[in-house]
Image (spheres, rainbow, N blue to C red):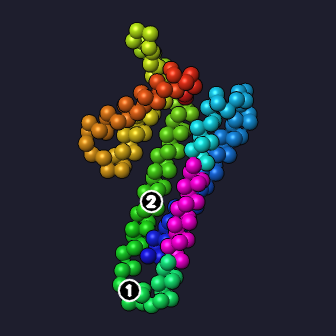
Amino acid sequence: MKNKVYSLIAEGILFCGSGILLLSYSLMSYAKSFNKAWSQSPYLFPALVGAALIGLSLWIIGQGVLEMKRTAVQAADGVAAGKADGGNAGNGAGSHKKLAAVLSVLLLCVLYYVVLGEVSIPRVTIGILSFSITISIFEVATIVFLIAMMAFMGVRKVPVLILVPVCTSLFLSIAFRTCLHVMLP
C-alpha cells in the first residue's frame, strides 16, 4: 500500500510540474505575441490545459496524502498488523511499471508538441461547395498521436483506432479554422 501512496504523490508532482511548465510557456509566449486579445490568442488553450493539469495533479497528491493518513490510522489500530508481511513483495515492480507508463505518455505528448512546432508539410485545401477543409501538420500529427495513445491505452479494434482519430482531427480542424477562425499549427 505504501508503494501506491508514494506513486500517487510522485505522479501528482510530475503532472503538476508539467502543468506549471505548460502554463508558464503559454503565459510567456502570450506576453511576447503581437495579439493581445486572449480570445484570439493561440496560447489560451495551452494555458487552460496547464491550469487544469495543475488542479488535477493537486487532487492526485491530495488522494495520496489521504491514503497515507488512512494507512497510518490502520497501522495504529492494529488492523494492518497481520497484513504487514503479506502482500508487499510484488508492489515494487508494479510501481515502476506505472511510472514507466506515465513517463512514456509524457514522452508521447512532448514528441507530439515538437512535431507540431518543428515539422512543416504543405497545406492542402479541399473545397466542397462553399465549405473548405485545410489539412496540414496539425491533422496528420493529431491522427498519428491519437492512434498511438489509443493503442497504448489498449484499444485494439482497427475501425475504432482509425475512425476516432480521423473524426476527432477533422472536427477540431473544422471547428477551429472554419467556425472560430482560430489559427492551428
Q: Position of residue 121 (x, y in %)?
A: 49, 24
Residue 100 bears which disc, if any?
Answer: 2
Instruction: Determine whether 160 is above or below 122 in the image.
Output: below
Q: Position of residue 78 (x, y in %)?
A: 45, 90
Q: Position of residue 64 (x, y in %)?
A: 52, 69
Residue that sits furthest to the top in the current view? 129
In this rendering, does residue 136 appear at all? yes
**Residue at figure coordinates x 30%, y 46% from the top left:** 155
Which one is in front, 75 or 33? 75
User: Marks 1 and 2, how far apart in space?
Assistant: 28 Å
Q: Secondary structure at mark 1?
A: loop
Position of the C terminus by quadrant: top right
Which one is in front, 3 or 54? 54
Which one is in front, 134 or 103? 134
**Residue at figure coordinates x 26%, y 39% from the top left:** 158
State left or right for residue 115 relative to residue 42.
left
Report the mark closest to the observer, 1 or 2: 1
**Residue at figure coordinates x 52%, y 30% from the top left:** 119
State left or right for residue 101 relative to residue 43.
left
